Amino acid sequence: MARLPFTVIGGFLGAGKTTLLNRLLRGSAGRRFAVLVNDFGAVDIDSRLVTAHGGDTISLANGCICCSIGDSLVLALVRVLEKADRIDHVVVEASGVADPARIAELALIEPMLERDGVLVLADATSVQARAADRHVGDTVQRQLDGADLLILNKADLVDAAQLAQTTAWLQARQAGARVVPAVHAEVAIEALFGLASNGAPAAPTAAASAATPPVRRWSLSTRGLIDRAALLAALAALPASVLRAKGILRLADAPLQRSVLHMVGRRIDMRSDTPWGIAALRSDLVLLGTPDMPADAELDRLFATVPVTPVA
Amino acid sequence: MSSTVIYPARRVITMSTHQPFATHVAVRDGRVLGVGSLAELQGWGAYTLDRRFEDLVLLPGFVEGHSHAFEGGVWRFPYVGFFDRRSPDGTVSPGLKSIDAVVARLRAIEREMTTKDGPLLAWGFDPIYFGGRRMDRGDLDKVSVERPVLVIHSNFHVLNVNTPVLAKAGIDHTTNVHGIVKDAAGQPTGELQEIAAKYMAYRASGIDLAAALSDEQAVWRFARVAQLAGVTTATDLHNELPDSTVAGYLQASARDDFPIRLLPAFGAIALPVEDGVAKLRALVRQNNERLRFGLVKIITDGSIQGLSARMRWPGYYNGLPNGVWNTGPDDIDRLLQAYHDAGFQVHIHTNGDEASEVALDAAERVLARTPRRDHRHTLQHCQMADAAQFRRMAALGMCVNLFANHLFYWGDIHYAQTLGPERACRMDACATALRTGVPFAIHCDAPVTPIGPLFTAWCAVNRLTASGRTLGEAEKIGVPDALHAITLGAAYTLKLDHEVGSIEVGKRADFTVLHDDPLTVAPEALKDVRVWGTVLGGRVFEAPAG
């Protein structure tokens, strides 16, 4: 059975975690998310969509389930994995003082899970003050340090200069930080959590399009052998508006095996997978991003710098 | 007319100021009818004279203000700790003095197991007493290379596992996860810490573990262990209180032979506050003589020995980074305010002094917004508080429950590694509590350390570490003050001092029965005073000879 992607959403109290989760549950785009939350009461679930409510779990008509963490995250997660055959993706809301990167490591000791991304929200109006606070400063800094992708929320509540300054501050304290500005945690769900397993964007439903902005998509397909180092360099050079990349690749230094690329924010994971077998010997790379993602032509130019050796 | 029983005793130590000592106590309807001489008590009318305590010493039943019914849960599994520990059936599980002894014990248990591949879980292991050698998977592979073997450490935050557990989870030299300990060659040793440990414990032993740890049988085992130590009132000081647990508590406490009064504290983080308050109000309506809902618990930080306590400057003596918040300062304010406004008493876990400071700040703000007399919100553990923090507790009307057992079990570690000499010598500052007038109790935090109020009192009196070092002459208290802390003092921190904690007319007939007189033995021998048994609401519970 395929491993379930495991995403952790972190951020200090008030940064917008619940807002993002509400978007996820409303606009799941055909995927069945299991969402583990700290406070049931804060999640805004349309009661008409609830198909079952069993104490610590709410089932929704769109296939998603929402589970209360209560006082034990690990126990809640173990319980969710009992239902693994009915879900496609596990999302955990870290508590406001937890270190989301530590929680994400659970995927590395749980064979049913695959670490996806650590998304950390920061409140543009207060993140710098919080990070300097006597009691919680180190907690906030740990959260920011562990982020694969930073969502700088409440961007509408500060002026452009402040937004630029806070973005620069975040980038200065973490090498390669990817910072995406957002208002009311509005970031395309598919760009944050990836596409449905068939690889194609789900047909947008009325609810989904209303709840989240559109996702931008760019793809590359080639039969040639790709240079690993140059590809990784190109990916690292992408702007923050490119939120994810997924690829099944044929690399010049490992042509006999499929190489699987997985990128969320600044974290790039390339692992060698099974031999090609009867699959077509072809590399496919997909980038997902916000509407601010560079134009196709610009991305074409960037990836044209990656050497590809033609095969006879 | 109800019957009256008069018990003569070698001595009755009442903890009541107007009559500290007596020779007889009269019991009617489960309550103390009177205490004094036989002549004084005869005036109440017909009585039966019961001479079974004639050569024994009676005290008010001990009150354990900070323990967990989880103690009864873990006794379902074998104990493999360093120190002897009394099990619920009264037998002593002998301390294991080497890693090889632990392995030998586990092998013996493994051979008796009826399933072929079911997990073997043990608890209570503490590696600090084996001269630096750590247990590794090689040790536990000698127990079995087929079934999962898991050894939970006494702090409940670290776990040792055998190779099958690692293999099933896919943990190898490539697994870079915080809390997975590796050897010099980069291979996982089988020691797992914190969240990784907790996850693996549940994952390897199955989803039923949580239920097994808090079912009706578990609460019975807890009550028995407590009773054997002379305890008549004990807290279960953090519980999410799911319906299944509540049902077990109600069933157990409905029986006359349930040997303790149990006070569960609801873990405030488990539910949104409106739901939590409503749940607790409903639970309070189900209270009975032996079961009292109504306490609330907030956990702020971690533990000192786990390096997860929140410390003020200058932090950990060994220079490691500050600990973690389990509940952040904003949420502490919010939760305390909500349960304070709803009229409940809140117990706040604070190990490090920064956590104590944040809790005191929160209490000060809450009391400024909505003043309330006699709230008795209590700082629990509060191990590092300095004199200024105690003065604030006194000013705010707060109580404190100090973790005296830590002095013995982890005092050497605190002295050498976590706190350093100066702060280790003022930790769990009972004498400062006395001087500043903060009502205080002392506790064991079972199952982290064994339940045994006389041992806890001995710790507060002698302040000796496991290696024999005295930690802070100036914070020692006398035996009478220590006995007060495990009876009336603890009852006060639970708002039960009108009912239990002293032997006085009208109060519950809850007694601890001792073979020896704790006020005449040498203070160093306080922990060796033998418990004969207890009396709860007039019903006698004799403990088997230990």
Image: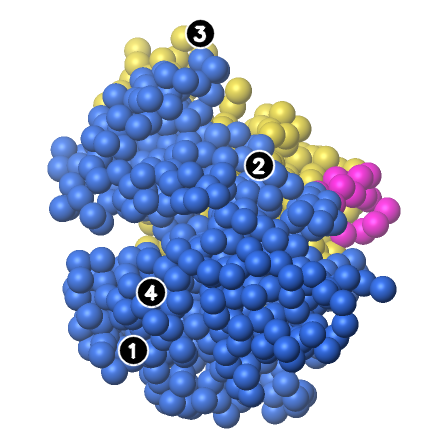
Chain colours: A yellow, B blue
Q: Where is mark 1, residue-wise?
A: B476
Q: Earlier in the sequence, mark 2 or mark 4?
A: 2
Which residue is disc 2 drawn over?
B212
Closer to viewer: mark 1 or mark 2: 1
Q: Chain of mark 2?
A: B
Q: Nearer the viewer, residue B215 or B474?
A: B474
Evaluate whether label 4 is on the same chain as label 3. Answer: no
Which amino acid type is marked by label 2?
A: Ala
Instruction: Calculate the distance from the C-alpha at mark 1 to the C-alpha at mark 3.
Output: 78 Å
What chain does mark 4 sit on? B
Q: Is residue A241 left or right of residue B38?
A: left
Front label number (2 vs 3): 2
x then y, percent, for residue A214: 64, 48
The crowd level at tag 3 (other Cα within 10 Å; few <14, some 14-19, many 20+) is few
Q: Which residue corresponds to the image point at 22% horizontal and 79% vertical from the top-left?
A: B473
**Is B59 one of the magenta-colored residues?**
no
The image shows residue B523, relative to residue B306, as above or below, that is below
Task: Tell me which residue sits at (47%, 53%) in the image.
Answer: B532
For numbered disc 4, what is the local secondary structure? helix
Distance from disc 2 to disc 4, alpha carbons, whole Å, reads 35 Å
Q: Which residues are magenta?
A: A45-60
Please state the chain letter of the residue tagged with numbered disc 3 in the rendered image.
A
The mark nearer the N terminus, 1 or 4, is 1
Residue A80: x and y, percent? 60, 36
Within the image, what quadrant is residue A280 found in?
A: top left
Q: Is residue A10 left or right of residue B370?
A: left
Query: Which kind of residue does numbered mark 3 sit on?
Result: Ile
**Numbered mark located on residue A278 in the image:** 3
Q: Position of residue B379 (x, y in %)?
A: 48, 74
Q: Which mark is residue B526?
A: 4
| Distance from the alpha carbon under mark 1 to that under mark 2 | 40 Å
